[in-house]
Image (cartoon, rainbow, N blue to C red):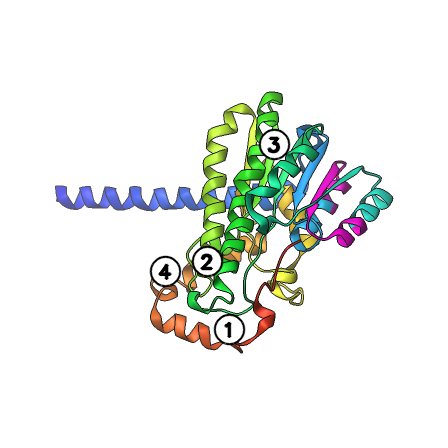
Amino acid sequence: MQLFDTLATIGVLSVVWHLLHLLWRCWSGFRQYILSQFCQVDLRRYGQWAVVTGATSGIGRAYAIELARRGLDIVLVSRSKDKLQLMVKEIEEIYGRKTCTIRVDFTDGHNIYPKIAKALQDLEIGILVNNVGITYSENFAYFLETPDAHKNITNIVNCNMLSVPQMSKLVLPYMVTRGRGLIINISSETGVRPHPLLSLYSATKLFVTYFSQCLHAEYKSKGIIVQCVTPFLVSTNMTRHWPVNGIIKSAQAFVYGALNTVGYSTYTSGCLTHALQSEALTVLLPDWLRMSSFFIQQLRKTSDVSPCENEKHRIMAKEE
């Protein structure tokens, strides 16, 4: 009888623990995705200027526009001169904010950062959005199917990984001196758990996730917030501008919701629909299935053509 009572007590405590954990997650989700829509943080508290990498398309462009709409001056960093000028015109004429442009290609590696540092040295940088990123194919592909592998592997590492700590290193010392600052690092749902057939891209985004969490732990006592954003599907160049629906968000809608989570969460899916999709993916596609040879083979069959067979897959989705 004593053993039965002990087991019953352990069972009750376990149920209570799981219920409390569920209630906490529900409350956290409510604060992050619902309450934040009505009680937005004033982002101008962090400083006058926001720097956005990959600022002329997709999520980066949406961040630049939304930050300007919320009252910040914008430093636009991209490789496309023509697109930069269009962004300057839109931000200055529509939102009345000042702009600064830096034209660099993040696939060029460490050589570009002295140029960026010189352009930023006299600006009060309050927010940095590390958004720039590329992938090498619009299809699911085995690692050895990487087209022009020697070049593209290096490009992806330089753009997706190297850019994040290098840009953070440029702005972080001044944020620490002022005792305030916000760094937003755009990871991906593919950086939450390993995704075969997106192996290199998934690995680079996992780096962004871990680096963000570690950097926040190191500098939160200095008044610095480092937020990691892990979007699911957003209609951009990288997703071939898939039609917006209940699952796929527009870049503008996604960024509006994601910026609202600042001050409420340092690790976020960006919006409620993406958070729910992430939870569903965890349940419906567990690790043992996602990593199985059978699932990988079936997923590969969904691709129309091998990346090695079509030149257009070389660098399909650069977020400029």
* Residue 247 locus on image (x, y percent): 59, 63
Q: Which mark is residue 287?
A: 4
Residue drawn at (24%, 43%), measured in percent from left and top? Answer: 10
Residue 261 is drawn in which quadrant?
top right
Residue 243 is drawn in which quadrant?
bottom right
Read off the residue under disc 3.
171
Closer to us: 216 or 313: 313
The earlier-in-sequence mark between 2 and 4 is: 2
Which residues fall within the magenta stretch? Answer: 65-86
Marks 3/2 in contact by CB < 8 Å: the verdict is no
Q: Nearer the viewer, mark 1 or mark 2?
A: 1
Q: Which mark is residue 308?
A: 1
Read off the residue under disc 2.
200
Marks 3/4 in contact by CB < 8 Å: the verdict is no
Does the rendering let one see residue 210?
yes
The earlier-in-sequence mark between 3 and 1 is: 3
Label 2 – label 4 distance at C-alpha: 18 Å
Please name the amino acid that badge 4 sits on: Asp
